[in-house]
Amino acid sequence: MDRAQKEKVVEELGQIFESSGVVVVAHYQGLTVANMQDLRGRVRDAGGAVRVAKNKLAKIALDGTPASGIADLMTGMTVLAYSEDPVAAAKAADEFAKENDKYVILGGAMGENILDADGVKAVAKMPSREELIASIVGCIGAPASNIAGAIGAPASNIASILSTIEEKAA
């Protein structure tokens, strides 16, 4: 890789570290190509991406970013899983790590917060953005549903009383 290519990689990594809601750093030594494709697919389906880069270039890209504290994790064969959603990449990486012993989560960063492996697992247990939005919409919609039910209830009660009276008269 020549100098221009290295500068491009550093720039791309810098943008990843600046714009991502979460970055997960893991060792992947011993994973097969099929395993890596599976990991990439899972993270992509969750709304994130996976990137393998030289540790030295990643450390240069980390310099001056909010996630600069994870530079110490960049040793050995490391892979980065990241997403704009603060939970998506952590959740996908944690699920993959449970199924593959050779994929070892070292830690990560969530904005300026540096996470250890247990921190990444804790973030993975949080509800995703979509789940939170769905629960908020459900909370907002519930009162309207209750009001509609309350308004419709007297009419249905009157109708059932009238039908009962009609049955007795017949």
Image: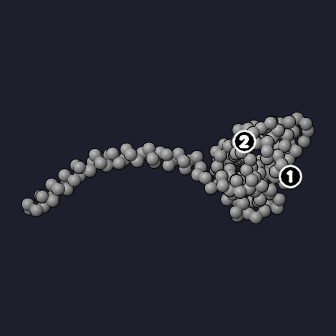
Foreground label between 2 and 1: 2
* Residue 19 point in image, percent of width and height: 70, 38
Q: Is residue 125 above or below residue 14?
A: below
Residue tagged 1: 75
- Residue drawn at the location 88% of the way across and 35% of the way down: 4
Mark 2 secondary-structure assignment = loop
Q: Earlier in the sequence, mark 2 or mark 1?
A: 1
* Residue 82 point in image, percent of width and height: 71, 47
- Residue drawn at the location 28% of the way across and 46% of the way down: 151
* Residue 106 point in image, percent of width and height: 77, 55
The quadrant the N terminus occupies is top right
Q: Quadrant of residue 58?
A: top right
Camera-side residue of 11 and 62: 62
Mark 1 secondary-structure assignment = loop
In the picture, the disc for residue 52 is none
- Residue drawn at the location 47% of the way across and 45% of the way down: 137
Residue most extreme to the right: 2
Q: Quadrant of residue 113?
A: top right
Residue 32 visible in the shown view:
no
- For the residues marked 2 and 1, what is the alpha-carbon distance in whole angstroms? 21 Å
Residue tagged 2: 112
The quadrant the C terminus occupies is bottom left
Label count reads 2
Camera-side residue of 116 and 32: 116
- Residue drawn at the location 54% of the way across and 48% of the way down: 132
Task: Inspect the image, locate mark 1, and give the three-letter code of the amino acid beneath it.
Answer: Thr
Q: Is residue 169 left or right of residue 134?
A: left
Neighbourhood count class around disc 1 (C-alpha, 10 Å): few under 14, some 14–19, many 20 upward: few
Task: Inspect the image, locate mark 2, and give the three-letter code of the amino acid beneath it.
Answer: Glu
Residue 101 visible in the shown view:
yes
